Every structure is written in C-alpha cells, then in structure tokens.
Image (cartoon, rainbow, N blue to C red):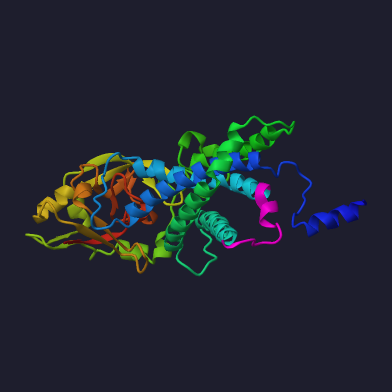
Amino acid sequence: MSVVQRAGAVQRAGVVRFSSRLHDERVASWLGIWLGVSFTIAFVTGLISHFMQHPPGWLMWPSRPVNLYRVTQGLHVIGGLATIPLLLAKLWTVYPKLLQRPPIRSVGHALERAFIFLLVGASLFQVVTGVLNIAYWYAFPFFFTTAHYWTAYILIGALLIHVANQWATTRHTVMKRPEDGLNRRAFLATVAAAGGAITVTTVGEAFPPLAQLAVLAPRRPGVGPQGLPVNRSAFAAGVTQANANDPAWRLRVTGRVQRELSLSLSDLRALPSRSVRLPIACVEGWSAGATWGGVRLRDLLHLAGVDPDARVQLVSMEVAGLYKTSWVSPRHWHDPLTLLALDVNGRPLDLDHGFPCRLIAPNRPGVNQTKWVHRMVVA
C-alpha cells in the first residue's frame, strides 16, 4: 500500500495522524497535572485580589500581614505569565485529539467535548486578557476585572469536570513505567525552562533584588517619581498642580461625626506625624516599598469623634474613574500603620503620588490607596 493509500485509509478510519511521537497521553498527563496546579493557584490568588478590591459586606479583610496582597498578587500575575508556555505545550500535545473525526460520536462524547471547549476557551481568554491588562492595553470592549473574575469560575468548573473525567486515565498513565524509548523528559524540561525564564524576567517587579532582570515587567521598583512607579498619573486623573496647590484646598471630614473637620495642608502638618514603611502593590503584579510620613487615620477620626465601628469613604479630587473613592473598614483605620500620607521617602508627595495627601494602608490593593484625597465621609 502506498503512502497516499495509507493516509487515505487512516483518514477514513476517523483518525488524524501527526508526525511527532510526543502527542501521547503520558506527556499530556504530566502537563495537565502541572497546569491544574497552576490554574488552582491562579484561581485562589485571583479570588483574594478580587475580594480585597471589592469586599462583600460580610467580609472584613485584615490589615495584617502587611505584605499579604503584595505576595498573593505577585504570585497571581507572575505565576500566570509562567503558565503560558505550559498551556501552549499542553494544547500542542493534545490537539490531534481535538481534530479527530467524527467530532461527535455520542451524547456523552458531545458533552465531554463541550466542556473541553469551555476549558480551552476560558484558559486562552484568561491568559490573553491578563497579558493585555498588565501591559495596559485594553483592546477589548468589556471591563477586564468583571470578565476576568467570572471567566475564572467557568475555567475552574470545566477543569474540575475534566479532572474527574480523566482521573483514572491520568493516574494509570503517570504511574505506569513507560515501555518505549521516547525522551519525554527533554520536552518537559524545555517547557519548565521556558516558564522559569518568564518568571526570572518578571519577578523583579515585586522582588527588588531581581529588578534589573525584570525586562518583561511593565513596572520596576525604583523607576518613577520619587523612586516609585506610577500607574495612574495626575494628568490621566484630571488633577492639575493648580488644583492641588489651591490655597482654598481643605480636607473635610463629614458624615456620622461629632465634629466636622475642615483642615488645610498646614493644619494637617501641624498634627502629630508618624512614619511607616509600607509597599504599594498593584493588581498588575508589581509592588514597591517606600517610607511614608503623615497623620494616622485613626488619630484624625478620633479628632472628629467617630464611632469605633464606623466605615470611612475617602473621596479623591480625581475627575472621574472607577476608583475615585474607596472604603476603609474599621480594621484598617484602627491599624496604626494606616496613614493619611503627606510625604514619601522624606519628601512631600509628588503630584503623581497624590499630593497634597493620600491614603496608605497595610495589605491593601494599590487602586484602593486613594490619591488626591480631599474629603472623608464617615458612615
């Protein structure tokens, strides 16, 4: 039988033949295990990030440990980037099965392929939109945070169903000693090395000793005004130097208070000052530590006569934006490390860092460290 005749016979039998012997179950199983672990870590750390930014009413997120968000979000983003070669390798290994004919052989097979379609689609969606988000390129018409959050549930649900369906096969495959001479280790080591290379060239955005190696990171510690990166500049927020330096500027504390306050910048600087060492940690995975000086938020609220269980809304001079305001829970404003900061690294705040004053609090996402604060409303 000629080569053409054999190819025709294989095609009529409903099987697509590929040249590489690495399209086998053992390679696919090991990649699947690694990918499952990686997706699980991303899902858990992603939930932490989401609920820190948008805490439900029943959740009182702690202010300690100070670096919790810095570590979990760094792990989420850097680990997610390292997953890319793993996901591509997995798809390359199994794509012959995705192209088998006939595509549907039974109702059960149709359901199985539907969940695989959800798994593959959700995986690619999360990776692609995640990369675009940390690159600050919003080339999609939907709000990234909402889409990323809900797609994560689709991904993890489809993954659990896939694991349940493939568990017996995977367990048998990885536990059985291979009988062929195929060098799978070199392929798997190459995939692991690619993920490691991505990690090394991005982890410096959250780990300063490796900052010089972070060539793939969108932000690096030490780069920016006053030695700190900036995501949203004053120009982007619509805050001008003239507005910030307006002699009529006052910080007003209103709402459920015994005494309403209206404080100028000089008044704030006349209050007892504190200095703390805290990081700015952003959703894109980067973080940078700094020394902040200013007034403890709890001292300011005690001056206004606020109830111990009150929540406080900080309002920015920012013209518009989803994070123009943020809520501070009792656990955070009672913490002595939470400041209404006036200085950073020994100098008055740069306009891009929130001059004349901003919030800085432990274990809090950067988008909720409100800049250009001019009003506090106690609820």
**Relative to residue 89, is residue 9 drawn left or right?**
right
Residue 334 visible in the current orientation: yes
Residue found 38% across the figure and 51% down from its top: 47
Residue 282 percent across, percent down from the top left: 41, 50
Q: Residue lying at the far left in this picture: please name it.
A: 258
Q: Residue lying at the far right in this picture: please name it.
A: 2
Quadrant into which the C terminus falls = bottom left
Above/below status of 142 relative to 225:
below
Answer whether residue 101 is magenta in the image: yes
Residue 12 percent across, percent down from the top left: 79, 59
Report which quarter residue 376 is drawn in: bottom left
**Relative to residue 327, is residue 179 drawn left or right?**
right
**In this view of the protein, which residue sits in the foreground, 228 or 7?**
7
Residue found 8% across the figure and 55% down from its top: 305
**In this view of the protein, which residue sits in the foreground, 366 or 251?**
366
**Relative to residue 342, is residue 4 drawn left or right?**
right
Residue 284 percent across, percent down from the top left: 46, 51
Answer whether residue 30 is magenta in the image: no
Residue 354 visible in the current orientation: no
Residue found 35% across the figure and 69% down from its top: 319
Report which quarter residue 187 is drawn in: top right
**In this view of the protein, which residue sits in the foreground, 17 or 227?**
17
Q: Residue lying at the far front in this picture: please name it.
A: 106
Residue 98 percent across, percent down from the top left: 66, 56
**Relative to residue 30, is residue 348 drawn left or right?**
left
Report which quarter residue 194 is drawn in: top right
* Stretch in magenta: 93-107
**In this view of the protein, which residue sits in the foreground, 93 or 337?**
93
Residue found 84% across the figure and 54% down from its top: 7
Tally of marks: 0
